[in-house]
Image: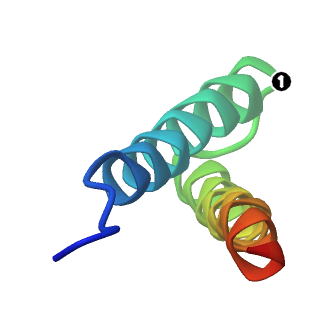
Amino acid sequence: MRGYNIWRPIMLIAVALLTRQLVTSICLMFGMSQESAGSVAMLGMIVAALIMYNRMMKGRRRR
């Protein structure tokens, strides 16, 4: 367990969920249907999670 950081997975989940909520709200504000907004938000959530994961691992690879 040495070197394990509990905040990384928590932060990754939080960013993904906040991104999903933000994208859903913006899409609904612009008049999209609930289903379409949910689909776009899911894509946004996946992209945000992948970007965040890559940024976290980039610093770890250099060590």
Lateral position of residue 4 relative to residue 30, left or right: left
| Residue 37 sits above or below residue 52 on the image | above
Q: Position of residue 35 (x, y in %)?
A: 54, 59
Percent of width and height locating residue 50: 71, 72
Q: Quadrant of the N terminus?
A: bottom left
- Please, which residue is most extreme toward the top here? 29
User: Which is more toward the observer, 49 or 45?
Assistant: 49
Please state if 2 lies on the left or on the right of 62 as rendered.
left
SS at badge 1: loop
Q: Residue at x 74, y 25 (%)?
A: 26
Q: Nearer the viewer, residue 56 or 11?
A: 56
* Quarter of the rendering containing residue 27: top right
| Quarter of image, res 52 | bottom right
Q: Position of residue 14 (x, y in %)?
A: 41, 41
**Residue drawn at x 81%, y 71% as measured from the top left:** 58
The C terminus lies in quadrant: bottom right
Where residue 29 appears, x then y in whole percent? 73, 18
Compared to residue 50, the image places residue 32 above or below, namely above
In the image, residue 2 above or below residue 19: below
Where does label 1 land, which residue? 30
Pick the front one: 59 or 37: 59
- Residue occupying the point 59% across, 64% down: 42
